[in-house]
């Protein structure tokens, strides 16, 4: 069973806040709590759409890169509206969703998620919600933009371990 694991760790600090050089790195639980379980993601147009564009001599738009937050509260995965626009995705339908703000109608798109620098296989989506992640950035992971959420329809294919004490999360697939 392949595994992807990520953890937040750093050097312990002295009372003045400076790092203890030469010390062993230790988990930083508050970092995982602050950022949540995020993984690198590259969003691109669906493979069939890319093939159709190539057939007529058009180039596919460049993929959108950022982070995806694993969201156990999300029934279905979503991609930020700005990434949708940059990719030129056209809605293939509408889905009723329930959010903290109440019920809403959200556009649905077809797209592909790849996970660069991981061993997680790419996922082709037939239904992917357009969501508003306006200006969400993950400071502790290089100030990268949050451009997607991974919902339970994907997590159903994984074993997720969230180890808050050790500031690590693990995905087995």
Image (cartoon, helix red, strand yellow):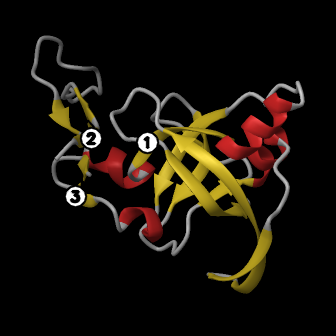
Label 3: which residue? 161
The residue sitting at the top extreme is 22
Q: Earlier in the sequence, mark 2 or mark 1?
A: 2
Q: Label 1: how many residues lie within 10 Å, few (<14), some (14-19) or many (20+)?
A: many
Q: Earlier in the sequence, mark 3 or mark 1?
A: 1
Q: Quadrant of residue 77?
A: bottom right
User: Looking at the image, which residue is at 80% across and 39% down?
Assistant: 52
Q: Circle 1 — which element?
A: strand
The residue sitting at the bottom extreme is 103
Q: Earlier in the sequence, mark 3 or mark 2?
A: 2
Q: Position of residue 145 (x, y in %)?
A: 62, 39
Q: Nearer the viewer, mark 2 or mark 1?
A: 2
Label 1: which residue? 39
Q: Circle 2 — which element?
A: strand
Q: Is residue 172 left or right of residue 84?
A: left
Badge number at residue 4: 2
Q: Position of residue 30 (x, y in %)?
A: 32, 49
User: Looking at the image, which residue is at 34% across and 49% down?
Assistant: 32
- Residue 133 visible from this viewpoint: no
Q: Circle 3 — which element?
A: strand
Badge number at residue 110: none
């Amino acid at each position: 069973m392949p595994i992807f694991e990520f953890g937040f760790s750093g050097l312990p600090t002295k009372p003045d806040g400076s790092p203890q050089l030469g010390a062993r790195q230790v988990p930083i639980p508050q970092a995982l709590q602050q950022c949540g379980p995020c993984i690198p993601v590259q969003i691109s147009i669906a493979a069939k759409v890319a093939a159709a564009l190539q057939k007529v001599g058009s180039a596919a738009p460049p993929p959108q890169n950022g982070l995806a937050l694993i969201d156990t509260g999300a029934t279905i995965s979503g991609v930020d509206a700005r990434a949708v626009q940059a990719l030129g995705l056209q809605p293939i339908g509408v889905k009723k969703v329930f959010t903290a703000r109440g019920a809403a109608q959200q556009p649905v798109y077809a797209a592909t998620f790849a996970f660069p620098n991981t061993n997680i296989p790419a996922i082709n989506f037939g239904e992917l919600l357009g969501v508003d992640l306006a200006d969400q950035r993950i400071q502790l992971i290089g100030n990268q933009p949050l451009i997607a959420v991974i919902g339970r329809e994907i997590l159903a294919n994984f074993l997720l371990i969230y180890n808050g004490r050790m500031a690590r999360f693990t995905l087995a697939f």
